[in-house]
Amino acid sequence: MALLSLITPDFGLFFWQTVIFLVTLYLLSKFAWGPIMSAMKEREDSITDALSAADKARADIEKLQATNEALLAEARIERDKILADAHKAATTMMEDAKVKASTEGNRLMEAARVSIQTEKNAALHEVKNYAATLAVEIAEKILRKELNNAEEQKKLVSEYIKEVNLN
């Protein structure tokens, strides 16, 4: 029966256990339940705040990533524009240099042509003068030979007078 008394409690034991339970419950609710509940509430609030802060941080990060991507795209567009402008400027400079070189080459060619023509004319003039001098010298020598006597001189003068009268 002693074994059975452990399994079946008697009324006194049950009464005192109930009283101790109620006193413990009262003491816990008076002194421990409030702080435990406030600690639980604080913990819940801090977890909620941490979750909302994490969500806000995630949203901020996504917004920053979107902004960064937009800035990168804008920077790429600006880079492409700068490269295109630089290429265009280089092409323009090359074309201008070609035109300038062509113009300068044409100017030098024309100056060379003028110089050559001037030198050619001077050389022709010199050759003509030399030819005229030679012709005069040859004519003088021929006339000296032919006009050694007075009769031939008179004959030549009369021919010249006839030619002058005819013209």
Image (spheres, helix red, strand yellow):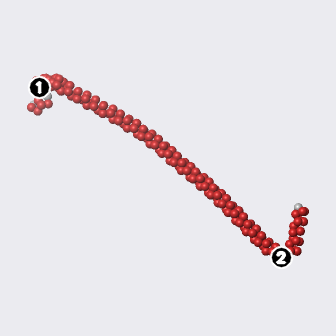
Residue 111 visible in the snapshot: yes
What residue is disc 1 on? 13
Residue farthest to the left, as pictured: 2
Q: Give how far apart the Cα atoms at labels 1 and 2 are.
A: 190 Å
Q: Check the picture and name the quadrant holding the N terminus.
A: top left
Residue 56 image position (x, y, % from top left) = 35, 33
Q: Nearer the viewer, mark 1 or mark 2?
A: 2
Residue 19 image position (x, y, % from top left) = 13, 23
Residue 41 image position (x, y, % from top left) = 25, 28
Q: Is 27 located above or below residue 88 in the figure? A: above
- Which is more toward the observer, 46 or 37? 46
What residue is disc 2 on? 148
In the image, taking residue 94 as reference, residue 9 lies left or right, namely left
- Under circle 1, the secondary element is helix
The circle on residue 143 is: none
Q: Is 74 located above or below residue 104 in the figure? A: above
Number of residues whose C-alpha sits closer than 10 Å to that of mark 2, classed few (under 14), some (14–19) or many (20 or more): few
Residue 155 image position (x, y, % from top left) = 89, 71
Circle nearer the N terminus (1, 2): 1
In the image, taking residue 5 as reference, residue 111 lies left or right, namely right
Number of residues whose C-alpha sits closer than 10 Å to that of mark 1, classed few (under 14), some (14–19) or many (20 or more): few
Residue found at x 69% / y 61%: 117
Residue found at x 74% / y 66%: 128
